[in-house]
Image (cartoon, rainbow, N blue to C red):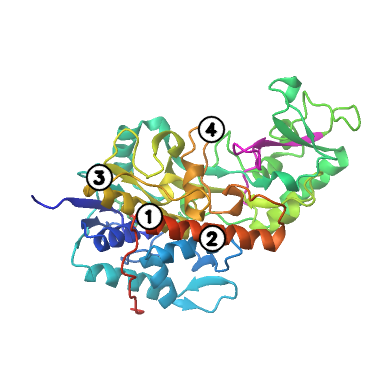
Amino acid sequence: MEQAIVSVVGAGLAGSEAAFQLARRGVRVRLYEMRPVRMTQAHRTGLFAELVCSNSLRNASLETAVGVLKEEMRRLGSLVMSAAAAAAVPAGAALAVDRDQFAGAITAALQREPLVEIVREEVTSIPSAPAIIATGPLTGAALSQALSELIGSRHLYFYDAIAPIVAANSIDMTVAFKASRYGKGGDDYINCPMTEAEYAAFVDAVLAAQKVPAHPFERTIYFEGCMPIEELARRGPKTLAFGPMRPVGLTDPRTGRRPAAVVQLRQDDREGRLYNMVGFQTKMTYPEQRRVLRTIPGLHNAQFVRFGSLHRNTFIDSPRLLTPALSLRARPDIFLAGQMIGVEGYVESAAAGLLAAINAARMVSGAEMIAPPPVTALGSLIAYITDQSRRDFQPMNANFGLMPELDGRLRGRAKKTELASRALSAIDAWIARYRLAIQPPVTAAA
Ligand SMILES: Cc1cc2nc3c(=O)[nH]c(=O)nc-3n(C[C@H](O)[C@H](O)[C@H](O)COP(=O)(O)OP(=O)(O)OC[C@H]3O[C@@H](n4cnc5c(N)ncnc54)[C@H](O)[C@@H]3O)c2cc1C
């Protein structure tokens, strides 16, 4: 019988990792990459796994979830992690790389793989299955159209508008209060009330804060309904108070009066550990978000699980479309991976490619589909993005807030160490149970 070939579309972070993993699991791969024949608005080279912006793969320490995710990937034989180690540059607590060496090493490694056939062309329709589609946040018009016909246009998004998420236990409930506007919907929201003076100072702080500059291709991004708070503040001193911060239908139990403005937070996970700041998408830089948003009454000690942002980003409504194995519910032989499934970041994208490849390889050999345990960094992220109860889906990065709580009362560093060690024991057990170990890649700098 002829051996199945898995099509992998896009040799970015996710597609490169996926192609390598498939090949090392004995599966033939046809890897399509359109660069340099056709470029995206952000890429500059024809190299695989080009880093389009920062050269950092973020924190390296096991006291962060993204550090744990990287370690899980190493244990699964990740090509991206191996290339990053070979191309690392000094960067303190972060894992940063020489971008050309990094992408060069990945390109060379895939060119050396006997089971990988590389096709440099743009894919404009859904490829023959089994397939992994990993064309990234800047997927072009033709393939987007084909995808939208496959999954339904209402499930395909072209921008993300991410509001910050706060750890519930860091909100000061002696200041904030639970209520819904006009009592409709019970106590679903946490409300942070502001006086006139606090509101005016907040608007000034938002206007003065440093912002992330938009890429030229993002200039047309703002549309009503997902306007960043600084753009609303710029339109007039009262605009926010008539928009996401409107206080109507709410009474502050401490004063018995309606506040001048409120910031509302809505529960973001089943367990009620995470709350997102409703309508607070923003392009303030991360340090500025931490500083400015902590001036909000009730949020003075807020721990931010995710910061806000606003990007050009092609992604799908994963909670409705994807299985935890990263295949489409309606087409189990088509997998999606990378930023387009609503994970956020280079490392998360590559990790998604790795998981999609494990399952595509298992499909080819007739084995059951699998997902990593939810106590792992990868498993908790996948559980979040494929949680069918989730509405208003927006992309997510790896973080400890997604993992199930520990028993006991550990805090701070001790808690992070325990979460990390639980995750790594679980990934080891998962690898052993399904025999997922592969020969680790050897990647010399290109
Ligand atoms: C402008 C910008 C800046 C970003 N900066 C950062 C950052 O600093 N740090 C961070 O962690 N994350 C960042 N991200 C988010 C994300 O981590 C990266 O976009 C990451 O590269 C996503 O990996 P991916 O594999 O999903 O997509 P990509 O790495 O973009 O890979 C997709 C690949 O598919 C190819 N392709 C696309 N369409 C087709 C087609 N039809 N046929 C064949 N090939 C095709 C592309 O050429 C590309 O090589 C940024 C995103 C953008 C858009």
Say whether disc 2 or disc 1 marks the residue closer to the N-terminus.
2
**Horizontally, is 204 left or right of 133 in the view?**
right
Residue 55: image location, x then y, percent:
49, 68
Task: Check if residue 282 falls in the magenta segment.
Answer: yes
Residue at the spot 34% in from the left edge and 75% down from the top edge: 443
**Residue identified by numbered label 2:** 66
Segment colored magenta: 261-283
Quarter in which the C terminus is drawn: bottom left
Residue 183: image location, x then y, percent:
75, 21
Residue at the spot 32% in from the left edge and 45% down from the top edge: 335
Q: Amino acid at mark 1?
A: Arg
* Local crowd size for mark 1, using a 10 Å CA cut-off: few (<14), some (14–19), many (≥20): few
**Viewer-proximal residue among 136 and 212:** 136
**Residue identified by numbered label 4:** 391
Disc 3 from disc 1: Cα separation: 39 Å
Disc 4 from disc 3: Cα separation: 30 Å
Quadrant of the image occupied by residue 266: top right
**Residue identified by numbered label 3:** 124
